[in-house]
Image (tube, helix red, strand yellow):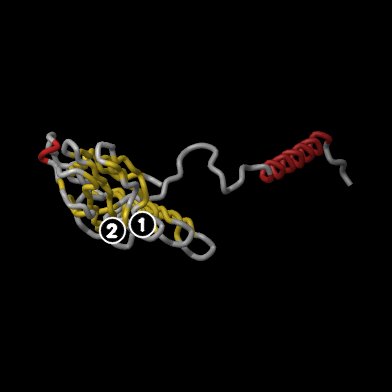
Amino acid sequence: MAAVPVDLLDRIRELERQVRQLAGRSQIRPAMNQVSKGDVRIGEGGTLGVYAPNGAQILGVGRWPNGEYGLHLGRQNGTSALTIRVGNDDAIPQPLRLWDAKGTEIWADDVRTGGIAFPYLGLLPPQASSPTLWPRTSNSDFSLIAQSFNSIWQPKIRLFMHTAADNGTSGEVRVLVGGKVWGPTVKVGDVFDYVGFTGADPGSLVEITVEARRTSGTGSVYAQPKMLYGRET
């Protein structure tokens, strides 16, 4: 048998080394669940979805069945937390919406002109500056002197109110929310300034009333709300 040339054996050994090297590199490539460089592009009507073990969609980005492209962030129980989509085929910019854990829409931006679209926030109208023009009573029992109805969107509210009385007259002022006494009963001349829970569900309509009574003297007792707004827990 003819001898194999030495240079051919060297070439075979070199090829074997290169094959082993390539095989080793194939085992150390980056994991397929990581992106080291560049972008991830989902096109042609594709979507990206993340689902909890119970099947609830936690994240949805991409094309929806109606042809719209949008975003959905949810809780693991399936309720929405944040969405950027219209939900129909209306040709308007997509609003950003926030949802509470009960599924109530608690905030949305105004996509037509900017600012907040929802919820509606009440603004206090200008008030009389002279106490003689304020709501008043001369009754010795608590009597209604002021009333308002408010759409409540936060768990607490703050009410700031001035009180007064005619010379030689004393009295008390209190506030009721939803028909129940809310906050302290103050002596006239003191400021009513209280922050507390309303016990109302978001979006519900709540009655806020001011009652006053005369405890001594012959004049009138006065009260005038000066500030009212919602507060967080």
Residue 70 pos. (x, y %) = 33, 52
Q: Quadrant of residue 180?
A: bottom left
Q: Quadrant of residue 4?
A: top right
Residue 161 pos. (x, y %) = 24, 40
Q: Residue at x 30, y 48 (%)?
A: 96
Q: Residue at x 21, y 42 (%)?
A: 225
Q: Is residue 13 above or below residue 79?
A: above
Within 10 Å of disc 1 (Cα), the crowding (few <14, some 14-19, many 20+) is few
Query: Disc 1 residue type?
Result: Gly
Q: Nearer the viewer, residue 207 or 184?
A: 184
Name the residue furthest left.
Answer: 133
Q: Is residue 38 above or below residue 145?
A: above
Q: Residue at x 15, y 46 (%)?
A: 136
Q: Nearer the viewer, residue 104 or 9?
A: 104
Query: Disc 2 residue type?
Result: Gly
Q: Residue at x 36, y 48 (%)?
A: 196
Residue 147 as seen in the image, left or right of residue 183: left
Within 10 Å of disc 2 (Cα), the crowding (few <14, some 14-19, many 20+) is some
Please name the residue that numbered disc 1 is placed on: 199
Kind of element beneath mark 2: loop
Please name the residue that numbered disc 2 is placed on: 178
Kind of element beneath mark 1: loop
Q: Nearer the viewer, residue 227 or 56?
A: 227
